[in-house]
Image (tube, grey):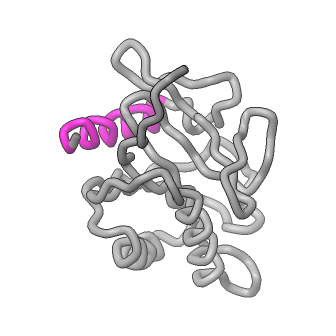
Amino acid sequence: MGQLRCSGKVKLFVGLLSSDKALFQKVKKVLEKIFGPVDFESDMLEFTHTDYYAQELGANLKRKFLSFERRIGLKNIYKVKLRTNLLEKHFSKSGKRSVNIDPGYVDLSKVVLFSTKDYSHRIYLNNGIFAEATLFYKNKKFNPWPWTYPDYKSQAYVSILNLIRDIYKNQS
């Protein structure tokens, strides 16, 4: 039998998606009030991997990643997704989201994303929130699983998440 031990703290990040460039800074300020100071902010990236969000969020979507200085424990981590869902509603216009906030975390071995949608490779956490191991660390970089979203397989995203991992590693 294995020894029971508490899990360490992980590095919280969010991927913001919107067609309104000015909204990124507004959302960042609110996120910092909730999760603390940002220690990494990516450049604005073109989001061309799918048109899934276009009807709701508009055309010419942009993505930006933020990570937070304060590491967090895993015990109630599902609450991060509940809070970001509330923020999406707060920034909605006419019943449509104007920003999609995708939270997740990085540790030394993986990138995990949260979702409200169940699927065969997702694990239920609590209150309707699921977790998905999206990338795994091997050969000095993050690598995709067969189910990894196409954008998270891209070199741009993997490079950003490797940088966030390096920040996390230096904090440990």
Find out whether residue 157 is within the magenta segment: yes
The image shows residue 93 at horizontal and vertical percentages of 67, 85
Q: Residue furthest left?
A: 170
State the predominant SS element of the stretch in magenta.
helix
Using the rendered view, name the quadrant where residue 44 is placed: bottom left
- Foreground of the two, 71 or 92: 71
Image side of residue 37 versus residue 66, left or right: left
Whether residue 46 is situated above or below residue 33 in the rendered picture: above
The image shows residue 94 at horizontal and vertical percentages of 74, 87
Taking the spot 64% from the left edge, 32% from the top edge, the residue there is 148
The image shows residue 80 at horizontal and vertical percentages of 53, 63
Find out whether residue 89 is within the magenta segment: no
- Foreground of the two, 148 or 25: 148
Q: Residue furthest bottom?
A: 94
- Foreground of the two, 116 or 29: 116
Magenta-highlighted residues:
155-171
Say if residue 125 shows up in the picture. yes
On the rendered image, what quadrant is the C terminus found in?
top left
Image side of residue 138 versus residue 149, left or right: left
Taking the spot 46% from the left edge, 69% from the top edge, the residue there is 21
The image shows residue 31 at horizontal and vertical percentages of 41, 72
Whether residue 171 is situated above or below residue 16 in the rendered picture: above
Image side of residue 93 versus residue 17, left or right: right
On the rendered image, what quadrant is the N terminus found in?
top right
Taking the spot 66% from the left edge, 62% from the top edge, the residue there is 59
Using the rendered view, name the quadrant where residue 29 is placed: bottom left
Say if residue 22 shows up in the picture. no
